[in-house]
């Protein structure tokens, strides 16, 4: 059973937030969607869909991050996740 904390964002909201941040980076670097598509090897339709809806495959997101020279942000994802309980600390030692 999945427990959702209703005080946090939904998966869709998180996806759209990430897409918005990527779009903002693309625009401030003055790269068109078409040019990003060419640089990343991700289809123009996928780039547009991602920026509009937040929908994209992980491999395409990685390609876009590399094209924008922000792949380090993905590499650092989940790097320092805090423990939620003492039991989790104990399990991590195995």
Image: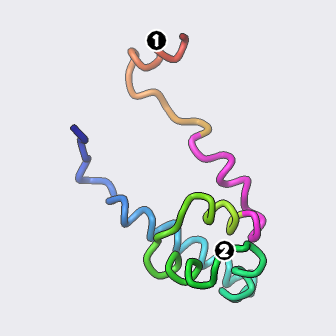
Question: Which residue is painted at 53% across and 35% down in the image?
Answer: 81
Q: Camera-side residue: 1 or 43? A: 43
> Is residue 82 shown in magenta?
no
Q: Secondary structure at mark 1?
A: helix
**Residue 92 appears left or right of 5:** right
> Where residue 61 appears, x then y in whole percent?
61, 64
> Where residue 57 appears, x then y in whole percent?
54, 63
**Residue 81 appears left or right of 43:** left
**Total marks drawn?**
2
> Where residue 29 appears, x then y in whole percent?
75, 81
Q: Secondary structure at mark 2?
A: loop
Q: Quadrant of residue 26?
A: bottom right
Circle nearer the N terminus (1, 2): 2
Look at the image and give the residue range highlighted in magenta: 66-78
To which residue does mark 2 refer? 42
Q: Camera-side residue: 30 or 49? A: 49
Position of 79 relative to 24 (above/below): above
Q: Quadrant of residue 47?
A: bottom right
Q: Quadrant of residue 23?
A: bottom right
To which residue does mark 1 refer? 90
Quarter of the image that includes the N terminus: top left
Which of the two discs, 1 and 2, sits closer to the camera?
2
Question: Which residue is painted at 66% across and 46% down in the image?
Answer: 76
């Amino acid at each position: 059973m999945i427990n959702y904390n209703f005080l946090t964002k939904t998966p869709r909201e998180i996806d759209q937030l990430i897409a918005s941040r990527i779009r903002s980076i693309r625009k401030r670097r003055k790269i068109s969607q078409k040019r990003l598509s060419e640089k990343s090897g991700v289809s123009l339709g996928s780039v547009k869909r991602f920026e509009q809806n937040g929908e994209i495959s992980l491999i395409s997101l990685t390609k876009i991050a590399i094209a924008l020279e922000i792949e380090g942000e993905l590499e650092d994802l989940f790097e320092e996740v805090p423990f939620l309980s003492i039991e989790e600390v104990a399990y991590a030692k195995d």
